[in-house]
Image (cartoon, rainbow, N blue to C red):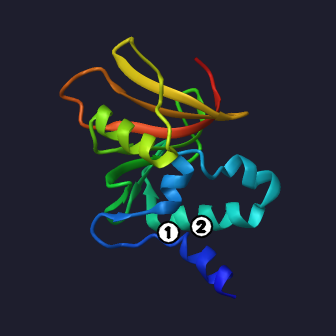
Amino acid sequence: MRLAVAALAAFVVVPAHGADDAGLARMAACQDSWLDWQKSNPAKLKAFGDRLRAGFERGDNDPFVVPKAEVSVDGLRIAQAFPESVGMGVGFSLLVDAKFDTAKRALERRVGKPLAHCEASDGMRSCEMPIAEQRTLTVMAEDDPKTTQTLIGCYYFYEK
């Protein structure tokens, strides 16, 4: 029973000011995967989807959802969540209010490894690290020192 309560508690969005959400952080860092849950644990996928719908809202035709209350991952405030894809990438990603280097360090702390494959091109900075088959951890932002938002996420299929 305690295990069931603990598992459910991990999927609750806390509406407190700036509350860290470990479940969203795990999904963005490829530690959990809706792709895997689709095949192996549909109930967990449904619970995660219900949780997103309860804590986030989508605008008309927007590809992203925004939090109803302030929420963060690893101390970084979430501005938007992309629960299925962004551009040509399919996965789960979050746009956080943090400069690129800050977001990269937070992601590296979470996974315990450096994101070594980094590049700057076409006005963007990005780093990535393959985690497993069909899972690539990614951090990217505009290559502009004034940019204050960074996309972090886990991509299952990525078209470059």
- Where residue 53 appears, as percent x and y from the top left, is 53, 63
Q: What amino acid type should be assigned to the residue bearing mark 2?
A: Asp
- Residue 51, quarter of picture: bottom right
Measured from the top left, where is residue 11 in percent x and y? 55, 69
Residue visible at 31% across and 63% down?
Answer: 70
Image height check: is 59 above or below 127?
Answer: below
Whether tag 2 and tag 1 are in contact, CB under 8 A, the answer is yes
**Mark 2 Cα shell of 10 Å, populated few (<14), some (14-19), many (≥20):** few
Instruction: Tell me the element at label 1.
Output: helix
54 to the left or right of 102: right
**Most foreground residue, 22 or 143:** 22
Residue 4, percent from left and from top: 67, 81
Q: Looking at the rendering, which quadrant does residue 98 occupy?
A: top left
The residue located at (42%, 45%) in the rendering is: 109
Q: Secondary structure at mark 2?
A: helix
Q: Which residue is mark 2?
A: 50
**Above or below 97: residue 25:** below
Q: Is residue 104 above or below residue 8?
A: above
Count of labels in the image? 2
Q: Along the horizontal axis of the image, is 25 left or right of 18?
A: right
Kindly identify which residue carries mark 1: 54
